[in-house]
Amino acid sequence: MSKKVVLGVLCGGALCFVTGFSTGYVAGIVHPPQALAVKAFQQPYSAQLYGAPAAALPPPQPMPSAPPVQPSYAPSPAPIKASALSNPEIGRKVMTEVAKLHGVLIGADGKKVDESQVVTIFFDPRCPFCHSLFRTISGKIPVKWVPIPVLAGTDAGISSSAFILSAKGEAEASRAIETAFSYVGEGSVAHTPDDTQKWLAGINPTEQQKKDLQESVSAFVAIHKAPGSDPTFGVPSVLVPMADGSVTMHDGYNPGDEDKIIADYRRGR
């Protein structure tokens, strides 16, 4: 299974996915970005949050004839393909909306491209798996990198994401992403904690940037609540528009997954 930073999310159903990203759901993220004003459940994650306490459950009944439970996802490096996204009509509509999200485009060599037809990767600048994927796939195919501050440390997530969104051009965007990972990425030893705090203090996210980040978080949640999606989704999360209009979705990262993503993108093109 691909490695990913897992998020616990509650959503009001699949209606938000079919009808759009702006209405129809309430997102409860493990570390809700409060400064973005995302309506979220504030209690910390626990296993009981998503079901009745163990003591309230009836004793287990033996089921000798029951078949073994099969995982609902394909093991890495095969993609997790949500059934709704496999519908070309829905896939095209989703990617049209995703193209409106604010991110940075890398790998297009300065050419004007239809952002609904490039790979989109949702990532958090604190996520080490996101960093690994960035280093292995960046520049090989056109990718729109959409930062979403969904992990612990809300202020750091918002500031580092806003820093990335402020970049102009591919070269500057690539440097901005690497800079953010070097300062706030989990496990990074490139800077001291004091240096990191000074760097973050020098970033002043605008209200528009906060709004843009909120829209990206909301879209990320809505897409992952589509029928057939992996309920334990996290970052990095990759959307690959196929030539027929359908979309494949890869969650997490293991070494070599970039080859599968690139192959999916190039198929039929």
Image (cartoon, grey):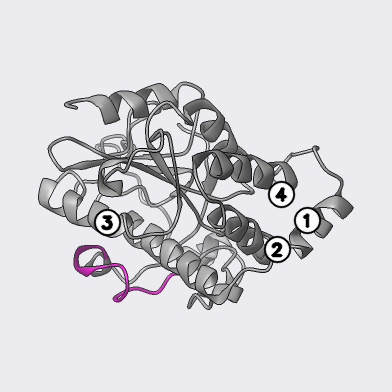
Q: Is residue 201 shown left or right of residue 14?
A: right
Q: Which residue is mark 3?
A: 226
Mark 2 vs mark 3, foreground winner is 2
Q: Check disc 2: other Cα within 10 Å, few if <14, some if 14-19, many if 20+.
A: some
The disc, 1 or 4, on the residue closer to the chain's N-terminal end is 4
The disc, 1 or 3, on the residue closer to the chain's N-terminal end is 1
Of the pair 179 and 153, the residue shown nearer to us: 179
Q: Which residue is mark 2?
A: 203
Of the pair 153 and 66, the residue shown nearer to us: 153
User: Looking at the image, is 241 positioned above or below residue 101?
Assistant: above
Question: Dividing the picture into quarters, in which one does residue 105 lie?
Answer: top left
- Going by the numbered disc 1, the residue's amino acid type is Trp
Residue 51 in the magenta stretch? The answer is no
- Describe the element under mark 2 as helix, strand or loop: loop
Q: Which residue is mark 1?
A: 199
Mark 3 vs mark 4, foreground winner is 4
Q: What span is colored magenta in the figure?
A: 17-27
Residue at (51% x, 55% y) in the render? 7
- Going by the numbered disc 3, the residue's amino acid type is Ala
Say if mark 1 contacts mark 2, CB within 8 Å: yes
Q: Which residue is mark 4?
A: 184
- Going by the numbered disc 4, the residue's amino acid type is Val
